[in-house]
Image (cartoon, rainbow, N blue to C red):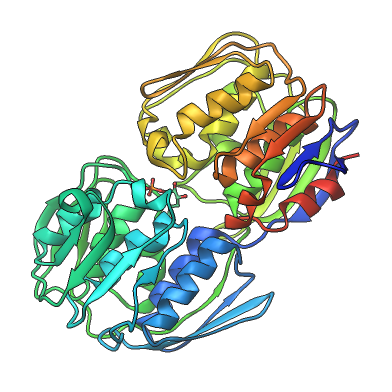
């Protein structure tokens, strides 16, 4: 339940007596963005049904429009008319990726090695996020790409060049980095072999394969052959599992609630919260209803008695966007939990190890940010308090879930940050919480 009045730009969220409902979350952000970027370099018209239409996906749409692709957006369908693999046009102005790391990093790969000059910039947060991770491998393919601090930060400037195939090791298990390299490799003069430290979400590989690209994937290695052309495609975008994770977490945390979330992405690799932690004892049922081109289905989450967990290693890249929620769940579990190997959280839309610790501590929960994760004391329930979303959509939603499952009202400053991925979040919250 949401009470007015709140200070300007803030929301006050009250504890819910009960949380019950059945609903569909907006289309997956990562898949919608890839639909736009990959559709723009396809031949013909691509249609995305149930797209996610937050600020991040709109940034991807504006970017491909600036490159000459035609985009039309309705609530339940998004259409992109692509220009073919070699048809993208030189943009007339700087390309603004807003808050979206996916837009910037994938666009780096999309634009590298073309006969054009382009500059990618973003908001204050995005301009502090690491870009060397794409600059280095793209240069190894022959791209001419520069950024502030020797390629560390945006704005990134891309100059005309030609690309060659190469064997590359990428240092972070990141779907954004992997995708940037694959997008460039499609236009190289020979095959590219990319080795990654651990698997990450594979939406790019799935869509490109459906478009006719030759990609051979094993757990550690992706071989990408150059392509002549890529076909347009029709895609039913599954619900965004990272958005649904907030409701799953809310449903799992007592007081006794019950929730059903339909059509959410249910991906074997970005497993995410719901079955990453059977060890935690969360009562979450998943039903996969379709697998092509992306798995999707229904999740039923129920209030659960949670056990402490230790999470780390290869699990972390799979649930990186849900790690703060996992920390919140752990505050309610019996015993002390530890989340490790999650140093990537330091370079998300905020330093999420720090902002999660600050948000949950402000509500009386005990967790400590470590250099690569959290140590979390269990057995507590969030109290009331004030949280600053720090410009990070996932921190705003985390605070809201802590509030509905907590014991006192929570004032969330910068609540509008949810627009980045889930513009209807507050409406859905009001519908779900009693
Ligand atoms: C995303 C990948 C993840 C994730 C981000 C979306 C994507 O980042 O945190 O929200 O769409 O590829 P990394 O790939 O850098 O881990």
Residue 410 in the image: state x and y as whole percent: 76, 30
Asked if residue 288 shows in the view, the reply is no
Task: Give me the residue at 62% from left, 16% from top.
Answer: 307
Residue 370 in the image: state x and y as whole percent: 41, 18
Task: Give me the residue at 58% from left, 42% from top.
Answer: 394
Q: Is residue 244 left or right of residue 403?
A: left
Quadrant in which the C terminus appears:
top right
Task: Give me the residue at 40% from left, 30% from top.
Answer: 342
Q: Is residue 240 above or below residue 163?
A: above
Task: Give me the residue at 22% from left, 48% from top.
Answer: 152
Asked if residue 137 shows in the view, the reply is yes
Q: Is residue 191 left or right of residue 236?
A: left
Quadrant in which the N terminus appears:
top right
Image-quadrant location for residue 13: top right
Q: Nearer the viewer, residue 214 or 341?
A: 341
Q: Is residue 138 above or below residue 94?
A: above
Say how many tags the image has.
0
Residue 77 in the image: state x and y as whole percent: 63, 78
Q: Is residue 297 left or right of residue 184?
A: right
Q: Residue furthest top?
A: 335
Residue 218 in the image: state x and y as whole percent: 27, 51
Q: Is residue 102 above or below residue 4?
A: below
Image-quadrant location for residue 256: top right
Q: Nearer the viewer, residue 199 or 372?
A: 372
Image-quadrant location for residue 91: bottom left
């Amino acid at each position: 339940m949401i009470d007015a009045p709140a200070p300007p730009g803030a929301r006050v969220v009250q504890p819910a007596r009960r949380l019950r409902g059945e609903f569909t979350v907006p289309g997956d952000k990562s898949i919608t963005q890839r639909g736009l970027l990959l559709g723009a370099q396809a031949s013909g018209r691509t249609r995305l049904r149930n797209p996610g239409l937050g600020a991040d996906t709109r940034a991807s749409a504006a970017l491909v429009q600036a490159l000459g692709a035609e985009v039309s957006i309705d609530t339940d369908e998004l259409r992109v008319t692509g220009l073919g693999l070699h048809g993208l046009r030189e943009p007339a102005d700087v390309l603004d990726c807003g808050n979206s790391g996916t837009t910037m990093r994938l666009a780096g790969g999309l634009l590298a090695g073309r006969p054009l000059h382009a500059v990618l910039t973003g908001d204050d947060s995005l301009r502090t996020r690491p870009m060397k991770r794409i600059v280095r491998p793209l240069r190894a393919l022959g791209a001419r790409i520069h950024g502030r601090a020797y390629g560390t930060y945006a704005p990134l400037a891309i100059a005309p060049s030609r690309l060659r195939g190469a064997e590359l090791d990428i240092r972070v298990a990141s779907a954004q980095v992997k995708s940037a390299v694959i997008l460039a490799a499609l236009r190289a003069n020979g095959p590219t072999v990319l080795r990654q430290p651990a698997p990450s979400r594979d939406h790019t590989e799935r869509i490109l394969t459906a478009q006719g690209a030759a990609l051979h994937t094993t757990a550690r290695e992706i071989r990408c052959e150059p392509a002549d052309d890529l076909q347009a495609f029709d895609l039913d975008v599954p619900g965004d599992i990272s958005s649904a994770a907030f409701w799953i977490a809310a449903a799992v945390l007592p007081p006794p609630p019950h929730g059903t979330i339909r059509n959410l992405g249910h991906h074997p690799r970005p497993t995410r919260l719901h079955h990453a932690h059977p060890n935690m004892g969360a009562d979450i049922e998943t039903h996969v209803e379709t697998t092509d081109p992306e798995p999707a289905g229904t999740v039923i989450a129920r209030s659960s008695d949670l056990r402490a967990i230790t999470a780390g290693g290869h699990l972390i890249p799979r649930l990186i966007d849900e790690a703060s929620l996992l920390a919140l769940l752990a505050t309610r579990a019996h015993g002390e939990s530890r989340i490790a190997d999650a140093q990537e959280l330091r370079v998300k839309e905020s330093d999420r190890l720090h902002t999660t610790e600050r948000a949950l501590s402000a509500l009386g929960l005990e967790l400590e940010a470590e250099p690569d994760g959290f140590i979390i004391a269990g057995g507590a329930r969030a109290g009331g308090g004030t949280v600053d979303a720090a410009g990070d959509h996932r921190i705003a939603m985390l605070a809201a879930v802590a509030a509905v499952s907590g014991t006192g009202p929570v004032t969330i400053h910068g609540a509008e940050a949810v627009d980045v991925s889930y513009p209807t979040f507050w409406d859905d919250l009001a519908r779900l919480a009693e």
